């Protein structure tokens, strides 16, 4: 039997032209900073954009943007995302209030379905999704519910990231998932370009290590104008030119 919430989710996301899940099978590679940066970068171009933080165990995008979890989104026949720096923002942190939330896989699926079923993404053409790390239930849900997603993969040049990267690319390919490309984070220069291209995937660019990065977070405007997001502006130009209309 079809879960009626799945239909509600399809209805809610049907009109979104580009769903961009930001993924890595390894933790701590910069998914949250990059997904928030990508959303702000699209907003800078006056594109109608949403950002959804689905990391129930480590939601961070509200911290990067400087949004208080007590500023609960408005309810009107569903939940309306919060407007911040030109983007529509929704996060599991509004519900978890930064408290730890141990969950089994099936509970994650329930929570994800419920949140997606009630969130009204109106006039949003681009929805960037920040994911918890790994290829477990969150990932499996994602490829089930967001089949039309254009997945953006994050890696670092560390040898410890590379096996995880190759595995992620292989799994996505096997599943017939559309991969926008790979961003190499914390890399002074392109290091993994040929490895990425060996998998027939686009290498979108590298982002250096910025020692001042912590001082740029906590205020969406400051972060949006930071060298980190300006670097993403250039990478986004690549994506929007070729993949996103
Ligand atoms: N380009 C960069 N320069 C300097 N520090 C960075 C850079 N990118 C990420 N970091 C640091 O790496 C850490 C992890 O970043 P982030 O939380 O965005 O990763 P993540 O992949 O979302 O982690 P998780 O898997 O836990 O969700 C942060 O503390 C951040 O300060
Ligand atoms: Mg994260």
Image (cartoon, helix red, strand yellow):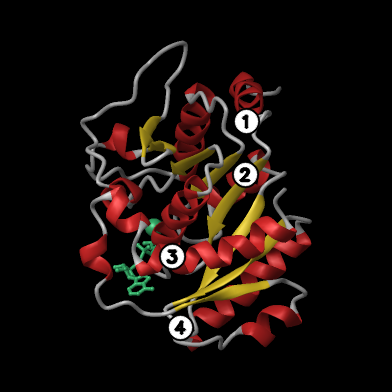
Left or right of 219 in this view: 228: right
Residues tagged 1 and 2 counted as in contact (Cβ below 8 A) = yes
Name which residue lies at 59% across and 85% down: 192
**For mark 3, what is the residue?**
230
For residue 152, above or below residue 231: above
In space, the residues marked 3 and 1 are separated at their CA atoms by 29 Å
**For mark 2, what is the residue?**
19
Q: SS at mark 3?
A: helix
In space, the residues marked 2 and 4 are separated at their CA atoms by 26 Å
Name which residue lies at 26% across and 58% down: 217
Marking on residue 187:
4
Q: Earlier in the sequence, mark 1 or mark 2?
A: 1
Q: SS at mark 4?
A: loop
Nearer the camera: disc 3 or disc 1: 3
> Residue 183 is drawn in which quadrant?
bottom right
For residue 145, above or below residue 40: above
Q: Earlier in the sequence, mark 3 or mark 4?
A: 4
Nearer the camera: disc 3 or disc 2: 3
Q: Earlier in the sequence, mark 4 or mark 1?
A: 1
């Amino acid at each position: 039997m079809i879960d009626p919430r799945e239909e509600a989710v399809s209805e809610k996301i049907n009109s979104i032209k580009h769903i961009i899940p930001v993924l890595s099978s390894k933790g701590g590679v910069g998914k949250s900073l990059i997904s928030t940066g990508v959303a702000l970068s699209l907003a800078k171009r006056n594109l109608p954009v949403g950002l959804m933080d689905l990391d129930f165990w480590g939601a961070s995008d509200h911290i990067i943007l400087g949004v208080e979890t007590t500023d609960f989104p408005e309810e009107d026949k569903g939940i309306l995302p919060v407007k911040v720096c030109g983007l529509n923002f929704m996060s599991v942190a509004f519900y978890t209030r930064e408290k730890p939330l141990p969950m089994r896989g099936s509970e994650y699926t329930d929570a994800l379905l419920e949140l997606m079923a009630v969130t009204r993404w109106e006039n949003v053409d681009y929805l960037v999704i920040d994911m918890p790390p790994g290829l477990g239930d969150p990932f499996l849900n994602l490829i089930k519910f967001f089949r039309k997603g254009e997945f953006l993969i994050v890696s670092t040049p560390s040898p410890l990231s590379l096996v995880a990267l190759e595995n992620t690319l292989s799994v996505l390919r096997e599943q017939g998932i559309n991969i926008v490309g790979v961003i190499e984070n914390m890399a002074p220069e392109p290091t993994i370009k040929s490895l990425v291209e060996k998998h027939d995937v686009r290498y979108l660019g590298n982002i250096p290590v910025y020692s001042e990065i912590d001082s740029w977070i906590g205020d969406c405007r400051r972060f949006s104008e930071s060298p980190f997001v300006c670097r993403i502006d250039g990478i986004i130009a690549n994506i929007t030119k070729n993949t996103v209309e």
